[in-house]
Amino acid sequence: MEIPDVKQSWSNPINEVKIGATKEEGGTRSHTITVGGAKTLPFLHFEGGRSHRPVVAMEVWDVAPSDWPEELRRHFSDVWDEPGKWAKKCVEEFGADLVCLRLQGCDPDGENKSADEAAWAVKRVLEATDVPLIIWGCGNKEKDNEIFPACSQAAAGERCLLGSITEDNYKTLVALCHADKHKVIAESPVDINIAKQVNILAIDAGLSEKDIVIYPTTGALGYGIEYVYSIMERGRIAGLGGDKMWAMPILCDIGKEVWKVKEAVVLEEEVPEWGDHTQRGPLWEFITAVVYLQAGADILIMRHPKAVKETKRYIDSLCG
């Protein structure tokens, strides 16, 4: 009996998005990173050739975190007083492909840092490292609109990935990306139609389809991950099938979600049957990353060095 050919072909490849700019391109990065380009579902190389491999960004803050558990503190507390030193360690010691600078210190409910202070943090990370940069606001839309003009200008020409825009807050960041040659993260609350709407609004405001990375929200393992997975998978199938508003690379903000769940942070002394927390926490982050890679994630933002190492090894095993 002849075995039928079950290969599936798709009509529309996922957009390629280039992050970072070299000296020849007007920036200062040693290299660029391109994500996307998939012509089939994740890692089915026999169906549609190889897309650009997924990449791992490590998270850096502009302030020292006050709520990170000891398992994270012991890796970063020696450098987290200054974002440049923190970023340098993530790249040189832990092998981060990109740096994600989170401007947490600008939160009005926290230290309420100014736009100038935010721009200083951006400059320090750019000076300390030569990899492409993600710049993520504090999450307060009014404050983000205040600080991002200075941050965008500080990194003008570097082709950073700025985040995030939403259905209700996109005009300022889209204008800055257009003016300073950056890319944008489009955020939506685990909803197929809202994700498309955010992309439509950004494109109508002047961005190209190849300037956008989708962030459909991320849940940690055991905390809604199956629902997020299903949305990501449906979106990727739609994009490959011809829906231009879902034909963008996908970003997952993993570390932020994982390191606030009890299964990752509770100490072994408190729940002995859960085992060694120094192994459990990184493993929780790694498994969360594996799930999203299978759903089509192109950029993973992570925290724990051990989880980063194992995730990159896993990507190597799938990409060859």
Image (cartoon, grey):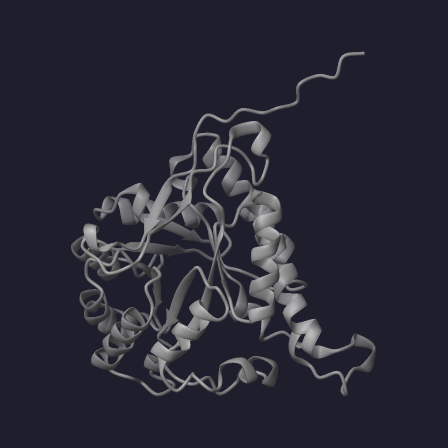
Going 54% across and 80% down the picture, which residue do you hit?
75
Q: Is residue 48 visible?
A: yes
Q: Name the quarter where the C terminus is drawn.
A: top right
Name the foreground residue: 137 vs 205.
Answer: 137
* Residue 128 in the image, given as x and y percentages of width and height: 32, 73
Residue at position x 23%, y 70% from top?
151
Q: Residue at x 67, y 77 (%)?
A: 262
- 222 over 124 or under it: above or below: above
Work out whether 85 lies above or below 206.
Answer: below
Q: Residue furthest top?
A: 1
Residue plotted at (38% across, 85% down): 109
On the image, the x and y values in percent for residue 290 come to 62, 54
Q: Residue furthest right?
A: 273
Q: Where is residue 93? Give x, y as percent.
A: 48, 71
Quadrant of res 156: bottom left
Q: Is residue 74 above or below residue 30?
A: below
Is 282 left, or right, of 214 in this rendering?
right
Give the mark count. Answer: 0
Q: Looking at the rendering, which quadrant does residue 309 occupy? A: bottom right
Is residue 83 or residue 295 the one in the foreground? 83
Left or right of 267 in this view: 111: left
**Rendered image quadrant of residue 1:** top right
Q: Is residue 263 visible?
A: no
Image position, residue 54 (x, y; %): 49, 50
Q: Nearer the viewer, residue 217 or 66?
A: 66
